[in-house]
Amino acid sequence: MVAKLRNSYGSGMEPLTYAGQNYMVVDRTLIPEILQVLRNQEQFDYCVDITAVHYPKREKQFDVLWILYSYARNERIRVTTQIRDGESIPSSVPIWTGANWLEREVYDMFGIKFDGHPDMKRILLPDGWKGHPLRKDYGILQQDNEWVQINLGIESGQ
Amino acid sequence: MADQNSSLSHLDLETPEKPFLDANELVINMGPQHPATHGVLRVILRLDGEKVLGLECVIGYLHRGVEKIGEHRTYTMFNPYVDRMDYVAAVSNGLGYCETVEKLLNVEAPPRAQYVRVILTELNRIASHQLWLGTHALDIGAITPLFYTFRDREEILKIYEKYCGARLTTHAFRIGGLQYETYAGFEKDVTNFLDFFRPKIDEYEELLTTNRIWVERTKNVGNISAQDCIALGVTGPVLRASGVKWDLRKAQPYANYKNFDFDIPIGQNGDTYDRYLVRMGEMRQSVRIVQQAINGLPEGPIMAKVPKVMKPAVGEVYHSIEAPKGELGYFIVSDGSTQPYRVRVRPPSFVNLQALDVMCRGQLVADVIAVIGTLDIVLGEVDR
């Protein structure tokens, strides 16, 4: 499979292994095409998780990753791509319906927008909240004081 | 196994259904403070008369930022926090977390520790299913099962209390194995429980399986097909009740599960009744696994060689286990320091709850309660 993908995408995709787990780092421009291929041709029909990691010191600050599983092959794979702050990424809801909430959570926690998502809004935090807590520059005690004061009627949630 | 190449067009959630009464659509709010939502879940229902046209879940009321906390604690310090996600299956959470960090550290727990882990985790599966059965039956109107299941669940909690001092958020496992050796009489307590519990499952079934009210309230309620389950990423008993024979303990064995002989109960119709039967079957299988583990419990050390200050090499690992609710995964990124750079929890309840909309369409309002119950969600895990 890896060889086949390598043939069609060349240097845009780099297959790697760590601790016995396979993952590939792909170019941002190959999303969602490569996900589509994995779903339709390689039978990765179960999207386990979509998440992100923030590296503030890097030029491309975010890793966005898809954890996929194939029932037919009993195999897991991770697809990782790097994007800049403020850059958006195509939604994979047309590929896996279950990506809906997972992408909303990534948006909520990191502020990464997914293009073409049917309902791109916060999921765990309230709609009016400012800031995205899982960014590294968001302090662990930090909160949206204004929101807390207006909506909860208290000085601080701490 | 479902048809792999099927299109997802049958899951078109935007198509409004034709009203069956000549009435306007009614939007009503359920929760977040509602006894049948099993926590603080808010559901906004779109109704036509009593028929559900669609619904939207509003979650996040219990959000505590567990993943953020994980980035600010050492690997060891974060271990007790994971118990607070799915707090009725704390032991499973701990198993998933410890095994993921062990993968990062490239160590493996010794055989004795693995056996004890399996015993405690499977007892936890029974306890979790008991709590589910009691509350789910209570929601539908059967009060008695709640008393039966809570009475029997107490025996499991007593074993936990004797083993590690805590009943609910146990923090039973450590990275690399176990902190505590089993107490004197542990094997006997567990065996006694199994002998006590085997006839109790039949007792639960006598109350419900052929009970006419139960059957009427659960058969053909909240149906979901295997294709929909896979497209939505639904796992655990919900997936198995739709006919997919998939269990991580068999598909990608972790801990010591490949050494145990057990079956995967599955259903066919993917309705609330089948999910009930699947979970009843799983309790019986858990009893089988615990019995085998007790019989084969090896002697030996309970802790692998793990450094006092854990600094896993730079890298990232995803590992998942079959929790009572479905696939519970941890994705941990290490930057070589004592604290995880990123901890991501893939909660089964969160992903399964997404199916609520699909399962409730076309059902009655009263069935929404049954479907929330049958999904077996824990809001502490949904919101983290």
Image (tube, helix red, strand yellow):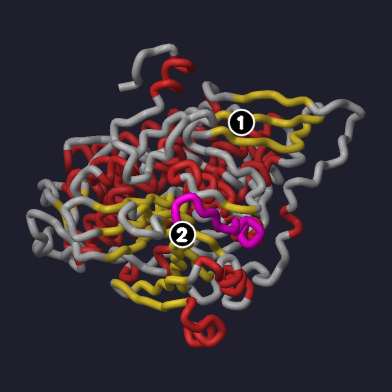
Question: Residue A83 — which label?
Answer: 2
The residue where tag 1 is placed is: B43
**Total marks drawn?**
2
Q: Dot 1: within a 10 Å radius of its alpha carbon, few (fewer than 14), some, or many (20 or more) residues?
A: many
Q: Check the image and name the residue furthest to the top.
A: A153
Above or below, B288 relative to A100: below
Q: Is mark 1 on a helix, strand or loop?
A: strand
Residue B119 visible in the current orientation: yes
Q: What residue type is labelled 1?
A: Val
Depth check, mark 1 against mark 2: the one in front is 2
- Would you say residue B356 sits in the magenta stretch? no
The part of the chain drawn in magenta is: A84-96
Query: Looking at the image, which is closer to me, B285 or A117?
Result: A117
- Would you say residue A92 sits in the magenta stretch? yes
Picture coordinates of residue B151, whole percent (x, y) = 37, 32
- Picture quarter containing residue B84? top left
Q: Is the magenta stretch mostly helix, strand or loop?
A: loop
Q: What residue type is labelled 2?
A: Ile
